[in-house]
Image: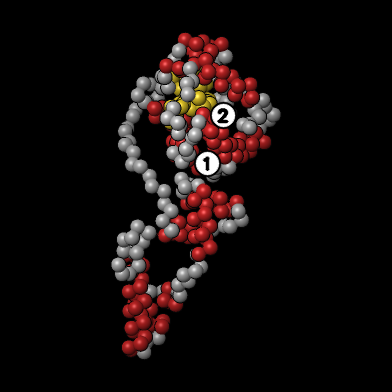
Amino acid sequence: MSGPRNAKGAPDKKRTELVDRRADAAYLIDTFAATQRRACELANIARSSYRHKPQPGKDKTLTESLRKLAAEKPRYGYRRLGVLLERAGEVVNHKRLFRIYRAAGLSVKRRKRKRLVRVGLPAFVATEPNQQWSIDFVHDRMGNGRAMRVLTVVDTFTRECLALEVDTSLPSRRVTRALDAVIAARGRPEKIRLDNGSELTSRHFLCWGIDRRIELNHTEPGKPVQNAHIESFNGRLRDECLNTSWFRNLWDARRRIAAWRHEYNHERPHSSLDYRTPNEFASNWLAAQTPTAYSGVA
């Protein structure tokens, strides 16, 4: 392969064109003794571009830093890696960061998703913590072959992960016990968005919602997009934790998933929160309000 090529290995048309124009300007200067200004005008190239000398080692340090961060967080894109670099004291222009990120072959492969147009009622938009929680289940398998389930609980306003309950079985009474523990720590939600699983439509769970004066909003069967916040969170959980970890047993799974939950709440930049962490966003919101019973997530 000859000539400049982009990160995907295909010929880079813009760079090839620039190289050709430089060669044209050099030919005019050498053959016809033209001035640099005149030669660049005829070749339609800026003099600064003609005089530019590539510096191959200039981006070496940044490339190594990106490779190291990408090895630790293989599912982070260049924007989140850029936030981590800024936290370490290295501020990089986003265009340069993207160019080096692509050239180093660190791009995260994304799966193509089928997108269907659905017509339904407008989704509820929370404006403060504890207005609406979303809950769901995620399934996985441990290294010893046993299946496990994870109950996920998210505040749709702060994006905080309130609980990740892990066990081989999570009946409705276990679910309500986990939710009661969260309520004891941060208060009662006004609404809970959930699907139509047997644990979440059982008589015990419905009575629990009535006793706690919590409005239970079930999605329509076969329409998980109506609970998009928890579906998005479950995707991050699977992508960054479950798919990258090997759990020896249930104790190991609980330990690793609990560590990821702490990282998600306190360290992971969230794109919908202007790349702040959920805990940072909640703390900033709380500081701007009058004192309330809300105290954040541990």
Residue depicted at x 32% and y 69%: 3
Which amino acid is tagged 2? Leu
The relative height of residue 52 versus residue 32 in the rendered view (above or below) is above
Q: Residues within 10 Å of mark 2 (few under 14, many from 20)?
A: many
Label 1 sits on a secondary structure element that is loop
Residue 4 coordinates in the image, percent (x, y): 35, 67
Label 2 sits on a secondary structure element that is strand
Residue 295 coordinates in the image, percent (x, y): 66, 29
- In the shown orientation, is residue 157 left or right of residue 104? right
Q: Which mark is residue 7?
A: none
Visible residue check, residue 137 = yes
- In the shown orientation, is residue 121 left or right of residue 290? left
Residue 165 coordinates in the image, percent (x, y): 53, 26
**Residue, far left:** 1
Residue depicted at x 50% and y 31%: 249
- Give the position of the N terminus as an image quadrant: bottom left
Q: Nearer the viewer, residue 160 or 213?
A: 160
Residue 117 coordinates in the image, percent (x, y): 32, 32
Residue depicted at x 48% and y 27%: 150
Disc 2 marks which residue?
A: 162
The relative height of residue 4 versus residue 163 in the rendered view (above or below) is below
Which amino acid is tagged 1? His
Disc 1 marks which residue?
A: 270
Residue depicted at x 50% and y 11%: 204
Quarter where residue 114 is shown: top left
Q: Nearer the viewer, residue 117 or 275?
A: 275
The relative height of residue 242 versus residue 100 in the rendered view (above or below) is above
